[in-house]
Amino acid sequence: MAEKLTQMGIAQAALAAIDADGIEGLSMRKLAQNLGSSPMAVYTYFPDKDALLDGVAQLLLAEVDTPPEDIHWRDAMRFIMRSVRHVAMRHPNASRLINQFPPHTPDALAFVEAGFRSFRRAGFDELSTARCYRALAAYSLGTLDIELGGYFSPETRTITSETRDSMDTPTAAKLLPLVTEITPTLLAQDDAAEFEYGLELLLDGFADAMSRSDRTA
């Protein structure tokens, strides 16, 4: 006899299936079979696949750790942003759901609440907090796309050459000297190190904006 279905249990089973076979390999029918139930029973809790994927996204976001209350706001942001990245690295097959579905359950919003509290304790007002959150979300989602999508992989950054082979064929080294020079450095960069570099630029910008706001207040 199958165990009683719950919304949480179904979402957890879906996450496990995605971790194993990818999002494209998930189907409501196959998931129901794995749960020892019928597809209609699953649809009782999730009306369609998008709703189920949203539920999986909430599980992923609930895995993001919250920082200690007493640390500096910059350390709190580092803590949260690194944790989001680590969650994505743990679930590469499911990570794009983080970009697709924003947090909306209490557990998924816990790290957002912790971040807001950290900003407000440091003196950021409502507008500044909202702007910083938006900037951090954009940076996090963008870097996940770049890193997990292989945007800077050697295969995707190869310069397309002319198919003709003659004396008047232009060469990349002559037409694109800086692209030719810098591309090897770009491809050799460490993803984690570049994530940290970009994060520090953002935090420096937040601190500078706060400083300028204090001087004009």
Image (spheres, rainbow, N blue to C red):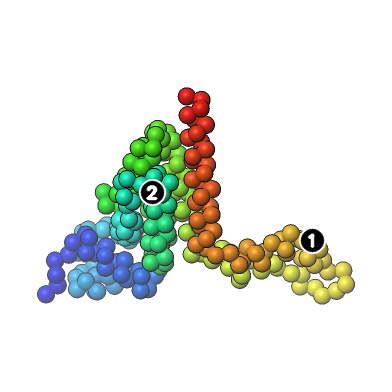
Numbered label attached to residue 76: 2
Q: Looking at numbered disc 1 in the image, what kind of residue is underneath it?
A: Leu
In the rendered image of this protein, does residue 74 appear above or below residue 95?
Answer: above
Tell which of 173 and 42 is nearer to you. 173
Q: Residues within 10 Å of mark 1 (few under 14, many from 20)?
A: few
Q: Residue furthest right?
A: 167
In the rendered image of this protein, does residue 126 appear above or below residue 51?
Answer: above
- Residue 173, position as x, y percentages in the image: 78, 65
- Residue 179, position as x, y percentages in the image: 71, 61
- Residue 21, position as x, y percentages in the image: 37, 73
Quarter holding the N terminus?
A: bottom left
- Residue 163, position as x, y percentages in the image: 76, 73
Please name the residue shown 52% across and 38% down the image.
Answer: 208
| Residue 189 visible, this orientation | yes
Numbered label attached to residue 175: 1
Q: Quadrant of residue 162?
A: bottom right
